[in-house]
């Protein structure tokens, strides 16, 4: 009786913790609004972090089992590299240590969030996925409200729930909103393509999944973020390519593609999205966006080149986290991530060596997920979701620091942790089945 009670408590913990996590990302506004100064940079996930960190520290044994030796070592190397290059550069270059440590704290935060979500998903995958599905419903409902009332509260189009309650009703980061919607597209599409692997018995479950695909596609289009749209459709293309290469195009995939095509056609002809698309993707808008971003990148490149002439090793070790905000002339004094490119910022902050270690960590998360799910019926669902998430992050990263901006980073790292934890849960189930079969065989022989 006691193990059953403990299991129920664990599943309840996973459900409540996961719901809190996804609600903070998709629905909770900034606790101090968009004020200038340090308080204006505080997010709800920052307030949540100490509790999540304490939970992870209490479950370090489970974290080590989930991550495995290679991934745990690579993550430790990455955090050590980021910390040392940040602190040493701050000491020897005179950077303000509180600001640089705050940026390192965010990197630590994302790794802890990945580990925590992996724990919750390993306890109960449904308890981890259900709250994310609930947030998809909330996002789609908010989008529908804005369309029906013709009150678009976003910077370009619709706003996500956490921006709908901002005084003045204007979203602060359309690219961040677009990346969050792109992640919903990836998750709902993977479920639609592999719905049989989830063994959902409700009659309305399959229509609900395809409705989530349609709603999330509509949301990412109506937000109006070019990087979000590129990430969402690039992720779908990557899954199509992966499916074609493995000759595993299934009816569920064809149905999902059909739903997406219908949504795009309706958006172009009925909702007036074509006007928004012309405004966002027209030649003038593209030239302004490209010119501004290229100027940012060239300015960062010039700053790093000038520094490398005096300190060649900075190309390898970087100038430390937050250094673009402390060195690049146009960004000095700002705490905003305005480089607008994940790769340029990473190379500037942690150098070629640190960027390579960081990419190894992401690759090992995917590899660990694939390895643990090798004999699971959910294997292709997890692969589709991981391939889609990494592709979306890679494409969005061309125009946004998607894995450093607060909400989008927490969402993507949490999503990868969810997939890793689900794979570990499936691996445990497979081991338990083998153990039962071996026990039955021994009794038969005896």
Image (cartoon, rainbow, N blue to C red):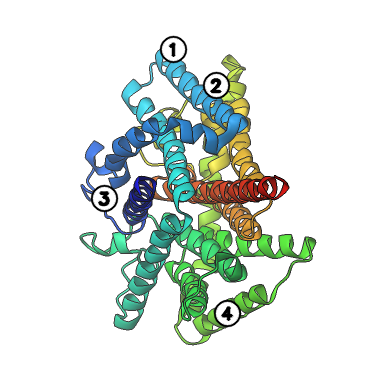
Residue holding disc 2: 307
Kindly report which numbered mark, 4 or 2, lies closer to the viewer in this rendering: 4
Q: CA distance from mark 4 to mark 2?
A: 52 Å
- Furthest-top residue in this view: 92
Residue 42: image quadrant is: top left
Label whose residue precedes the other's in the sequence (4 or 2)? 4
Find disc 1 in the rendering and name its residue.
92
Q: Secondary structure at mark 4?
A: helix
* Spatial separation of the CA atoms under disc 2 and disc 1: 13 Å
Identity of the residue drawn at 48% across and 81% down? 203
Say above or below: 358 vs 392: above
Mark before the other along the chain sequence, 2 or 1:
1
* In-front residue for pair 343/377: 377
**Observer-nearest of 192 and 199:** 199
Between discs 1 and 3, the one toward the N terminus: 3
Circle nearer the viewer, 3 or 2: 3
State how far apart marks 4 and 3 are (Cα). 34 Å
Mark 4 lies on residue: 259
25 vs 66, left or right, is left
* Picture coordinates of residue 266, whole percent (x, y): 52, 84
Q: Which residue is at the front of the view, 17 or 174? A: 17
Pointer 1 with pointer 3, Cβ within 8 A: no
In the rendered structure, find residue 30 and report the number of the disc placed on it. Answer: 3
């Amino acid at each position: 009786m006691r193990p059953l009670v403990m299991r129920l408590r664990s599943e309840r913990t996973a459900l409540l913790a996961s719901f809190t996590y996804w609600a903070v990302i998709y629905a909770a506004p900034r606790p101090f609004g968009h004020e200038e100064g340090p308080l204006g940079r505080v997010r709800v996930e920052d307030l949540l972090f100490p509790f999540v960190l304490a939970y992870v520290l209490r479950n370090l044994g489970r974290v080590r089992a989930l991550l495995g030796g290679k991934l745990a070592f690579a993550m430790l190397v990455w955090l050590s590299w980021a910390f040392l290059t940040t602190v040493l550069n701050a000491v020897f270059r005179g950077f303000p240590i509180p600001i640089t440590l705050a940026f390192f704290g965010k990197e630590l935060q994302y790794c802890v969030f990945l580990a925590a979500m992996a724990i919750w998903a390993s306890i109960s995958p449904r308890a981890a996925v259900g709250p994310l599905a609930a947030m998809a419903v909330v996002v789609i409902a908010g989008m529908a409200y804005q369309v029906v009332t013709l009150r678009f509260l976003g910077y370009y189009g619709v706003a996500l729930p956490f921006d709908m309650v901002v005084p003045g009703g204007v979203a602060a980061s359309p690219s961040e909103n677009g990346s969050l919607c792109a992640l919903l597209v990836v998750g709902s599409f993977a479920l639609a393509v592999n719905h049989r692997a989830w063994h959902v018995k409700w009659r309305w479950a399959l229509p609900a999944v395809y409705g989530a695909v349609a709603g999330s596609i509509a949301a990412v289009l109506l937000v109006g973020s070019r990087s979000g749209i590129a990430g969402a459709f690039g992720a779908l293309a990557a899954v199509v390519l992966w499916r074609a290469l493995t000759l595993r195009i299934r009816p569920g995939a064809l149905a999902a593609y059909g739903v997406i095509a219908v949504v795009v056609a309706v958006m172009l002809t009925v909702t007036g999205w074509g006007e928004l698309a012309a405004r966002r993707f027209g030649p003038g808008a593209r030239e302004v966006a490209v010119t501004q971003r290229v100027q940012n990148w060239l300015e960062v490149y010039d700053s790093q080149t000038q520094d490398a002439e005096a300190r060649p090793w900075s190309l390898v070790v970087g100038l430390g986290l937050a250094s673009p905000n402390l060195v690049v002339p146009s960004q000095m004094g700002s705490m905003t991530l305005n480089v607008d490119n994940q790769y340029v910022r990473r190379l500037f902050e942690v150098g070629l060596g640190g960027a390579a270690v960081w990419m190894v960590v992401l690759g090992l998360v995917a590899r660990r997920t694939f390895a643990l799910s090798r004999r699971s019926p959910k294997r292709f669902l997890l692969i589709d979701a991981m391939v889609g998430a990494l592709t979306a992050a890679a494409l969005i990263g061309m125009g946004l620091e998607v894995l450093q901006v607060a909400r989008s980073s927490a969402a993507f790292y949490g999503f990868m942790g969810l997939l890793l934890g689900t794979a570990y849960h499936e691996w445990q189930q497979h081991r338990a089945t083998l153990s039962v079969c071996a026990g039955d065989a021994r009794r038969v022989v005896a």
